[in-house]
């Protein structure tokens, strides 16, 4: 086995459809999006067998800022990443190489966003408090609707009585999407990603990503980004305005997103990660989504990965302050802060 770093001679093999959605983050489009949209240096480890066949990949982002320091992550912004291989020995070898890079760059920690744990002795810290919420979807909206419980169908019926309008598109809808997204992030107390990140995603996934905006009486009240892969669709980012919660706009939008996934031939709809029994977990569970393990593993050189979590005690005061800032200011300050958070 040979492990190459950023070597194009390793070929262009990609995980087959059977690996989705576990390894969506390995798509080359994501590496380019994160490099262009967040300015993260991209490093790709590729394992070859003796015949030169690609048998493993590990995409990494070097996340660094003067505020937080340096980290090596696979992959930031995304819910899943880490090592792709079917061979345990190859996985161990790729983690060994990633650890060498972490030491070389003197990062605080290496973070691998696995779904299947890699039993490596130097990955001494794990985070398993969140799960992926995924829904198997049938081939027609009618069959999907019939699978919902009566309470959910009633909620959708009630929401549909509002004169919602929906539009699908690309960069032409980016300003509308970003206005809703930035306001929602401010309300959550979280620094907002730059508009440039979403522009990069739409450009890199030109034929497989799209924005959805929902309007009520000509006002944009909810919006989402979809990325379609072979046989599954994920929603990396979605937001709705809180003051329109009573209209069911968010629920109505997600029903449209699932129908869109069916149109694109998906059999799995990925809602993203949630903490067990949290509000977002229950929202996703009501659609029939089932939890799938998330095992983020760390090689720690200094500090604690927990210090970077939004729910850490030392972040609560910062969150409360951020929630009181005007949205325009969070749009100015947020991108430079969040790009340095792994």
Image: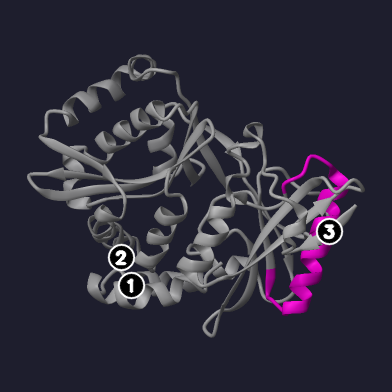
Q: Nearer the viewer, residue 218 or 27?
A: 27
Q: Earlier in the sequence, mark 2 or mark 1?
A: 2
Find out whether the residues at labels 1 and 3 contact each other: C-beta distance under 8 Å: no
Q: Give percent across and percent down for residue 10.
A: 77, 54
Q: Report whether 71 appears left or right of 236.
A: right
Q: Residue at x 82, y 64 (%)?
A: 97
Residue 41 visible in the picture: yes
Q: Could you classify mark 1 by the number of other residues whose Cα lies within 10 Å: few (under 14), some (14-19), or many (20 or more)?
A: many
Q: Earlier in the sequence, mark 1 or mark 3?
A: 3
| Local SS, label 3 | strand
Residue 66, placed above or below residue 147: below
- Alpha carbon separation for disc pair 2 and 3: 42 Å
Which residue, given by chain and number where applicable, does mark 2 sit on? 186
Q: Give percent across and percent down for residue 303.
A: 67, 75
Residue 323 shown in magenta: no
Which residue, given by chain and number where applicable, does mark 1 sit on? 322
- Alpha carbon separation for disc pair 1 and 3: 44 Å
| Local SS, label 1 | helix
What is the number of the mark on residue 3?
A: 3
- Alpha carbon separation for disc pair 2 and 1: 7 Å
Q: Give percent across and percent down for residue 147.
A: 39, 16
Closer mark to the observer between disc 2 and disc 3: 3
Q: Residue at x 30, y 24 (%)?
A: 152
Q: Report whether 331 appears left or right of 234.
A: left
Q: Report whether 325 appears left or right of 164.
A: right
Residue 100 shown in magenta: yes
Q: Which residues are magenta?
A: 84-109
Q: Earlier in the sequence, mark 2 or mark 3?
A: 3
Find out whether the residues at labels 2 and 1 contact each other: C-beta distance under 8 Å: yes
Closer mark to the observer between disc 1 and disc 3: 3
Residue 276, placed above or below residue 219: above
């Amino acid at each position: 086995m040979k492990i190459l770093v950023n070597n194009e001679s390793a070929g262009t093999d990609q995980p087959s459809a059977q690996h989705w959605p576990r390894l969506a983050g390995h798509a080359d489009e994501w590496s380019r999006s994160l490099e262009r949209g967040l300015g993260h240096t991209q490093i790709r480890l590729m394992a070859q067998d003796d015949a030169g066949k690609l048998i493993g990949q590990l995409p990494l982002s070097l996340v660094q800022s003067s505020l937080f320091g340096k980290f090596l992550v696979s992959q930031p912004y995304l819910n899943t990443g880490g090592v792709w291989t079917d061979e345990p020995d190859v996985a161990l070898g790729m983690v060994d190489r990633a650890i060498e890079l972490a030491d070389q760059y003197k990062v605080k920690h290496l973070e691998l966003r696995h779904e299947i744990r890699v039993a490596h002795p130097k990955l001494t810290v794990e985070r398993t408090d969140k799960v992926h919420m995924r829904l198997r979807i049938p081939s027609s909206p009618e069959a999907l609707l019939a699978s919902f419980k009566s309470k959910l169908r009633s909620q959708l019926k009630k929401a549909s009585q509002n004169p919602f309008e929906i539009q699908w598109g690309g960069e032409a809808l980016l300003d509308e999407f970003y206005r809703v997204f930035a306001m929602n992030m401010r309300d959550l107390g979280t620094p907002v990603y730059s508009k440039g990140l979403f522009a990069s995603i739409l450009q890199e996934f030109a034929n497989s990503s799209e924005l959805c905006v929902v309007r009520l009486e000509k006002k944009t009240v909810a919006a989402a980004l979809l990325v379609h892969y072979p046989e599954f669709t994920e929603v990396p980012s979605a937001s709705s305005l809180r003051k329109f919660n009573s209209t069911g706009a968010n629920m109505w939008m997600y029903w449209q997103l699932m129908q869109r996934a069916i149109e694109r031939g998906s059999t799995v709809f990925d809602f993203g990660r949630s903490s067990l029994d949290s509000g977002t977990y229950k929202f996703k569970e009501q659609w029939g989504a089932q939890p799938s393990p998330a095992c983020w593993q760390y090689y720690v050189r200094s500090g604690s990965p927990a210090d970077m979590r939004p729910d850490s005690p030392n972040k609560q005061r910062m969150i409360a302050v951020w929630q009181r800032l005007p949205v325009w200011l969070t749009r100015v300050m947020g991108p430079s802060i969040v790009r340095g958070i792994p």
